[in-house]
Amino acid sequence: MKHMHPLNRKAARIDNYVSSQTDDVVALQDHPSGPPRPHVPMGCALMFSPGWEVDASGGTAGLCQPVERDIYDCFVTCYWPAQVPDHINNAPDWAMKCATATKDWRNLDIVFP
Amino acid sequence: MTATGTRLYRLGEFHRFEAQGARFLYLVPAGAIFAVDEAVAKLIDCLSSGEASHEQLIEDLIARGVAGLEAEDLIAEMFHSGVIASDESRRDEPQVLPDDFPVQTLVMNLTNQCNLSCQYCYEFGADKLATPEGKPKFMDLETAKASVDFLFSQSGDRRAVHITFFGGETLMNFPLLKEVVAYAGGRAAGEGRNIDFSLTTNATLLTPAIIEFLSANRVGVTVSMDGPKEMHDHLRVFSNGRGSYDIIAPKVRALIQNHRTRPITARVTLTAGVSDVIRIFRHLKNDLGFHEVGFAPVTTSPNQLYAIGQQGMNSVLEQFHTLAQEYLEYALRGESHGFSNVSDTLAELYQGVNKSHPCGAGLGLLGVGPSGDIAPCHRFVDSDAHSMGHISTGIDRKKQADFLSRGHIDSKYDCHTCWARPLCAGGCHHEAYVRYGDTGHPNLHYCDWIRDWTNTCLEVYAAIAARNPEFLQQFAERKALQ
């Protein structure tokens, strides 16, 4: 927490709880509370458009392309079958507000058929 | 989930305090202690005059110099931690006690006889509850062994159990004490569990051989002692009226010198004539050498001459403040001070306890009298009205449930708006019975006193946490887990 510093055991438990409620979504390899780890772009399979793979350390931050890039492999090109809206008939505007997937992915909304 | 935009915020339940020029919050009923920054203080100010909507709160915070984005984060943090609340905040549901709570401590009153005649004694004095007529005066070996077996069978899967020897004057039945230590020690070893022993005594019957036994068996010793001679002899007298100080002083010195395996504690009862806390502390700690000294005002109905009145309690509190300040100075240097009223409270603050009951009586702790009657604690032993079963037949679950539901914080309505309730939970069941005739009545005559003292201990805790947090590590081990 930014504004409160826990001083006893019960406070530490509340601190954990609040962090779980307020912390932003982070990539698997990002450890906000732990020591920084090197990003080693190894082990990503170049024959795929990277997406569901993980990098050498088991996370996704070391892939040579961001995982969010995969959204369009599913949405437009249907390269990979996944649960994303169908852009041909039902949700052509689904990604209108998401020009750069790595930055704007929060703008992608749920579609109810 | 409600969108934040429609929330109406109000202040949650907490106690604000300052120490060493910094701000702190004690969250209630969680028992959590936080150091907080200026932004939190601003947020609390915003809501001090009443409820506010999310937008309004953001505006107020910006007006007080908090940046917009920062204000959003601040509100989220304060909301989820319970510093501020809204209608959708989770309400605390009363916690149902487990049906079978494992016993951890058994207080064995080895005898109800005593060789002193202290006027204020809750067992023999004017406010006594005990009805010992027709009951055994001394516990016999069979009852004692049955009590030990009872403790082991009722303690579930606890790794450690504890036996406290009590009286009457405990040492008037020392032969039995020795037998119990051997028997219970053997059972614990056989089951691969830990057991430890302690006793409370008036020290009149201590001998070198007894001291050697207590040291060899790591029996913790608390001596009931009220200070220097003139204070101690005021009420702690033999039946002929002669004071007991001269008898016990050399024995206490020998005890402290020769019992090297556990800290030796003095337990002082404060009365109208004996309330010079600092002088008593100096004498017991420095002159006699006790490791720890703890104080409690006498339990009494208010009309007894020795009862401490409001003025006396105020003076006691003032002196507690002085000793607490001294404790802090010692703690910052990493030294032990010995004022156990502070260290006991710090230990609870470290864990952040939030008590359903003021103590373990009738729950994890039980008393057993010389007759084998089970009582909620040693203070109710031998009282027919408070008996809670017998060692041969086990705990009377109906009486236990009645005692525990009376004493539960949820049934003490006066306490529901008090910020000190996580620690106090209404105070001693026995004190409540003597004062109000009901073990479940909150001890309202102490409320201001308890709040002031809790605040003082919070200030000491926060100061230590800020400047010498390593000191608090000694409180990391929970007693129940040892």
Image (cartoon, coloured by chain):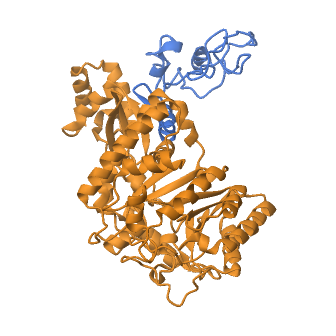
Image quarter of residue B2? top left
Horizontal relation, residue B209 to residue A2: left or right: right
Q: Is residue B88 visible?
A: no
Image quarter of residue B439? bottom left
Picture colour for chain A: blue
Letter of the chain shown orange in the rendering:
B
Horizontal relation, residue B138 to residue B385: left or right: right
Horizontal relation, residue B392 to residue B268: left or right: right
Residue pictured at 73% horizontal, 56% vertical:
B216
Instruction: Compare residues B480 and B168 and report the one nearer the observer.
Output: B168
Image quarter of residue B48? top left
Residue pictured at 42% horizontal, 52% vertical:
B423
Q: Position of residue B465 (x, y in %)?
A: 47, 32
Quarter placement of the N terminus of chain B: top left
Residue pictured at 53% horizontal, 50% vertical:
B290
Instruction: Compare residues B268 and B363 and report the one nearer the observer.
Output: B268
Is B436 placed above or below A22 here?
below
Q: Position of residue B479 (x, y in %)?
A: 59, 51
Residue pictured at 25% horizontal, 18% vertical:
B65
